[in-house]
Image (cartoon, coloured by chain):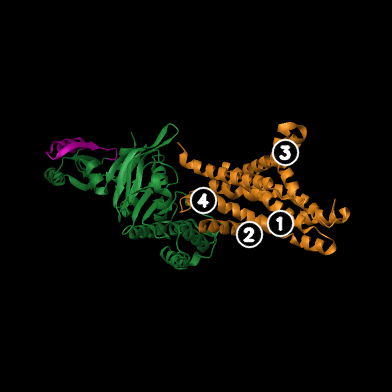
């Protein structure tokens, strides 16, 4: 099932929390939904899951409108909310049985579904414990398990790895990547390495509007324009080194920071690194560092979400 | 229907997994037994084979205990955020409210029906009016249903359990006492209006063994309105704009 967001708008009083956004998510795709706090990510997720209403526009899941058929469509959606709210007084398997029953899983299939989720989410040692007794990582797994137990075609995961240790994060990411092969997944996060590691496509939202939509490399290409090289040169007088590098045809601008790192903005499609190396050889300078610098996703995110 | 039953089962299990159910049962049965058999205008002092003493005691003990049972039903879910997970499952707002209503009702019914031993005891020591006793139990159950729906409404308004408890008590006080007092202070149409709104007057009538349609309509109207308003408060989240 695909998700189609069409001119979606949501007001909180006079404030537009989501401002006329449109995008699609295909089956088998993992979309990373990024944005600073208060950008409108969670509000959008709550509208997709029919928890709050749409003020303008529409959300279509498998071609059916959430606005008119939202109650019926919930069966096809698995949702892990931002703070993973769970009933701490319930045992893990009791809670999974409760979730499965509410999502319409036939009674005779529930035990096998629970067994499958326990295995997939690594909950075997904890399944008889009360949720309140579990560590944060295991509670997150329970949250994922309840989102998946009815085998939904769509998964909405809001900050699924928050508070997990690095080992648990890797496992959850592997699980999400595996799920994304068949399901439609929207992953809300502001952990940028997670987006790069897990998602097929990235959507950045800021102040209710979409400011970027594409793969990580698409976004980098759009943001870069000119690539950057960092160089460190010894045995040469800094001002002379700087002016000589500036004279190279393949160099756009040169700056030197307070640690004497030379930052060279290269002209597109020019062999700037080779030119710098040859210049150093010619002047008998010692080149101790020559590193191409890719615009990081953090930089792209910061540039797009700060004004 | 399945969803309602699933929610009811979960809430009932939660009552009995925590101390709430046991405390309520012990206190209710303790008060009922003490004031029915041992102290005050107890059965032996009154000297009649009737459970009207018990029904009067239960009329007040349930008034206080039911808000304590209902206060966490929706308020706690809103506070912890579990309401978001619950309402994004394939259940309607109405099914959620009904599931919680039935859970509270079954708990109170267990408490009330645990006193059937009183009925058996009194029947063995005197000539009882079986119709009056059955009608009395029926009126207790109806009264409980009404106060449960009021308690659920109060719980749906806030995410603070104490506020929910106090609000349920405050609303209940009007039905329990204030309308009856007002009925005594007014005559004519106003007097009749307050009389018809007073829960105690409808309860007294049924507890004496007279089951009138208007009493049934009265209690069921409170139940339906309480559940409906609770549902509307839940649905209000969708309309935040």
Q: Does the residue at mark 1 contact the one at mark 4 (Cβ under 8 Å)?
A: no
Marks 4 and 3, how far apart in space?
41 Å
Q: Are marks 4 and 3 on the same chain?
A: yes
The answer to which of marks 2 and 4 sits earlier in the sequence is 2
Marks 1 and 2, how far apart in space?
16 Å
Question: Residue at point 62% right, 53% down?
Answer: B104
Q: Indicate which disc residue B195 carries.
A: 3
- The percent coordinates of residue B90 (x first, y second) are 45, 54
Residue behind mark 2: B16
Residue behind mark 4: B82
Question: Residue at point 74% right, 53% down?
Answer: B136
- Give the magenta-colored segment's residue range: A238-259
Q: Is residue B163 above or below residue B127?
A: above
Q: Is residue A294 left or right of residue A13?
A: left
Question: Residue at point 42% right, 60% down?
Answer: A150
Q: Is residue B36 magenta?
A: no
Q: Indicate which disc residue B112 carries.
A: 1
Q: Does the residue at mark 4 contact the one at mark 3 (Cβ under 8 Å)?
A: no
């Amino acid at each position: 099932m695909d998700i189609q967001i069409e001119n979606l708008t949501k007001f909180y009083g006079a404030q537009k929390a989501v401002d006329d956004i449109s995008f699609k998510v295909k089956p088998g795709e993992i979309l990373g939904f990024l944005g600073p706090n208060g950008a409108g990510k969670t509000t959008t997720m709550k509208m997709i899951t029919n928890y709050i209403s749409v003020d303008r526009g529409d959300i279509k899941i498998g071609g059916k409108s959430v606005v008119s058929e939202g109650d019926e469509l919930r069966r096809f959606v698995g949702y892990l909310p931002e703070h993973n709210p769970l009933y701490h007084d319930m045992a893990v398997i009791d809670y999974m049985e409760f979730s499965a029953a509410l999502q319409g899983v036939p009674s005779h299939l529930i035990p096998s579904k629970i067994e499958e989720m326990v295995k997939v989410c690594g909950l075997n040692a904890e399944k008889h414990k009360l949720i309140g007794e579990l560590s944060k990582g295991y509670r997150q797994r329970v949250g994922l398990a309840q989102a998946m137990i009815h085998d939904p075609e769509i998964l909405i995961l809001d900050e699924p790895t928050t508070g997990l240790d690095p080992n648990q994060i890797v496992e959850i990411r592997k699980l999400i990547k595996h799920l994304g092969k068949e399901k439609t997944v929207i992953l809300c996060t502001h952990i940028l390495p997670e987006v790069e590691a897990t998602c097929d496509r990235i959507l950045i939202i800021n102040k209710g509007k979409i400011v970027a939509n594409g793969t990580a490399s698409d976004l980098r290409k759009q943001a870069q324009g000119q690539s950057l090289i960092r160089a460190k040169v010894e045995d040469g007088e800094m001002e002379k080194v700087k002016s000589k590098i500036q004279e190279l045809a393949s160099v756009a601008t040169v700056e030197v920071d307070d640690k004497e790192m030379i930052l060279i903005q290269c002209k597109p499609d020019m062999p700037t690194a080779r030119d710098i190396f040859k210049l150093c050889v010619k002047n008998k300078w010692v080149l101790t560092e020559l590193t191409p610098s890719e615009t990081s996703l953090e930089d792209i995110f910061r540039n797009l979400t700060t004004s | 229907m399945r969803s309602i039953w699933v929610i009811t089962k979960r809430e009932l299990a939660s009552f009995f997994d925590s101390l709430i159910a046991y405390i309520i049962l012990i206190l209710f049965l303790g008060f009922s037994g003490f004031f029915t058999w041992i102290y005050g205008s107890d059965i032996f002092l009154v000297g009649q084979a009737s459970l009207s003493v018990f029904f009067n005691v239960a009329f007040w003990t349930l008034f206080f205990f039911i808000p304590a049972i209902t206060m966490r039903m929706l308020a706690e879910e809103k506070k912890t955020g579990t309401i978001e997970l619950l309402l994004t499952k394939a259940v309607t707002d109405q099914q959620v409210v009904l599931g919680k209503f039935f859970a509270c009702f079954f708990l109170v019914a267990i408490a009330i029906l645990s006193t059937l031993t009183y009925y058996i005891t009194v029947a063995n020591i005197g000539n009882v009016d079986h119709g009056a006793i059955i009608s009395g139990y029926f009126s207790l159950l109806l009264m409980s249903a009404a106060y449960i729906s009021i308690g659920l409404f109060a719980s749906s308004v806030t995410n603070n359990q104490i506020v929910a408890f106090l609000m349920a008590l405050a609303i209940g006080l009007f039905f329990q006492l204030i309308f009856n007092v007002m009925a005594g202070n007014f005559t004519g149409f106003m007097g009749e209006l307050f009389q018809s709104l007073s829960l105690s007057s409808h309860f007294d009538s049924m507890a004496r063994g007279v089951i009138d349609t208007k009493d049934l309509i009265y209690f069921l109207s409170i139940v339906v309105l309480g559940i409906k308003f609770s549902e509307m408060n839940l649905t209000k989240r969708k309309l935040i704009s």
